[in-house]
Image: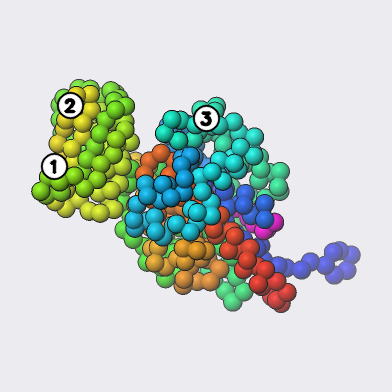
Amino acid sequence: MRGGVGLKHEPVPLAIVGGGAAGMFAAAVAAEREVGCLVFERKVRLGAKMLMTANGRCNFTKDIPAEQFLRDVGDPVSSWVASALRSCPPQSIIRGVRSLGVKLRRMEDGRMFPDSGQAATIVHAFGDLLRDEGVPLCVNCPVTGIQPMKNGFVVATERFTVWARNVLVATGGLSFPKTGSVGDGQDFARQLGHRIEPCRAGLTGMEVRDRAIAAQAGARFDDGMARVLDASGRAVFSSAGEVDCEKWGLSGAAVYNCQRWLARHGYGGMSMEVSYGGQRTALHDLVPRPLKEAIVTVGGVSREDVDPATMMSRKVPGLYFAGEVLDLDGPTGGYNLTLAFATARAAVVSVQARLREKKGELW
């Protein structure tokens, strides 16, 4: 090449599609392990949904042993995610966040928050790390397609394409679409032959036609209890915690966790009983709030199509999934961000090992 510098065209080792919790954590792990990566985010900034978690306070994990964490998550999710979670338990996440210079606050039940009470503190800490490590970010840049090829993938946007050796899809679920969770990752997976479990609302309130509840809209009861009852009236699941009265019904952690159990196990023949402030309300016609309002999406890329040890697709080598794009969810209280972080780490560790195996190959 006369008068210039000869260029050798090589793929980016890892393209991360999605700059939310799983995508940011994956990029941070990649930087630590010296795995070259490029992050694509459809919104103009990273971590839009993370900024909303815990009413903007960011309950990013729960300081409990890994085995207790898995019991709280429950099957069928816990057995599938166990390997990733044990390799990246809450205590490791806490140490990692502290290493970014974030002061933390631990609640009595183990929930962890930034001491500032602002989710932006953690999102900005991740952003600063990626900046300092020189991780390239393509924001305001939705990915429009992922095409496997003989020696990697073509990742397409509206204006350009990128050649990547591996791709991690970390686009989230379908709740709060204004934050960028619009289901594109599930669409990419479906187009590449993966099964998609039906997506429905998880950790959301229950609609109740009750004037007494509507009259108390805005009231919060910290010592509430919700129970799921089967057709015989036997309690099959229960959750203690906050119960909130809304104009449309009931919300709060106790209600959310019972609703998630129902979304996982089915509403048929079930009812719910909610106790709060000396009152008890029976819910026989179970109507959850819409998916777009839910804290988490139940459903997504089938776990059967993804190796739980590596997060790599069983159908497309080099294609990985992490976080809520998968059929993967946990209770409220820091569990879902932890699941996002743990699966993202597992994926990057696998990518690193795969790149070492491929080292020296001619492209």
Where residue 116 appears, x then y in whole percent? 55, 27
Furthest-left residue in view? 232
Q: Which residue is drawn at 41% across and 60% down?
A: 80
Between the residue at mark 2 and the residue at mark 1, the CA separation in whole angstroms equals: 16 Å
Q: Mark 3 points at which residue?
A: 105
Where residue 71 appears, x then y in whole percent? 37, 49
Does residue 131 sit above or below 280 in this rendering? below
In depth, the one of 27 and 307 nearer the eye is: 307
Where residue 287 appears, x then y in whole percent? 21, 43
Circle nearer the viewer, 3 or 1:
3
* 191 sits to left or right of 242: right
Crowd tier of the residue under label 2, counting other residues whose Cα lies within 10 Å: few below 14, some 14–19, many 20 or above: few
Kind of residue sitting beneath label 3: Arg
Kind of residue sitting beneath label 2: Gln
Q: Residue at x 43, y 50 (%)?
A: 67
Q: Mark 2 points at which residue?
A: 279
Residue bounds of the magenta highlight: 34-41
Helix, strand or loop at mark 1: loop
* 55 sits to left or right of 227: right
Circle nearer the viewer, 2 or 1:
2
Numbered tag placed on residue 284 in the rendering: 1
Q: Which residue is drawn at 71% across and 48% down?
A: 134
Kind of residue sitting beneath label 1: His
Between the residue at mark 2 and the residue at mark 3, the CA separation in whole angstroms equals: 33 Å
> Is 39 a magenta residue?
yes
Quadrant of image for the N terminus: bottom right
Camera sees residue 259: yes
Crowd tier of the residue under label 1, counting other residues whose Cα lies within 10 Å: few below 14, some 14–19, many 20 or above: few
Furthest-right residue in view? 3
Where residue 34 appears, x then y in whole percent? 70, 56
Quadrant of image for the C terminus: bottom right
Q: Which of marks 2 and 1 is nearer the N terminus?
A: 2
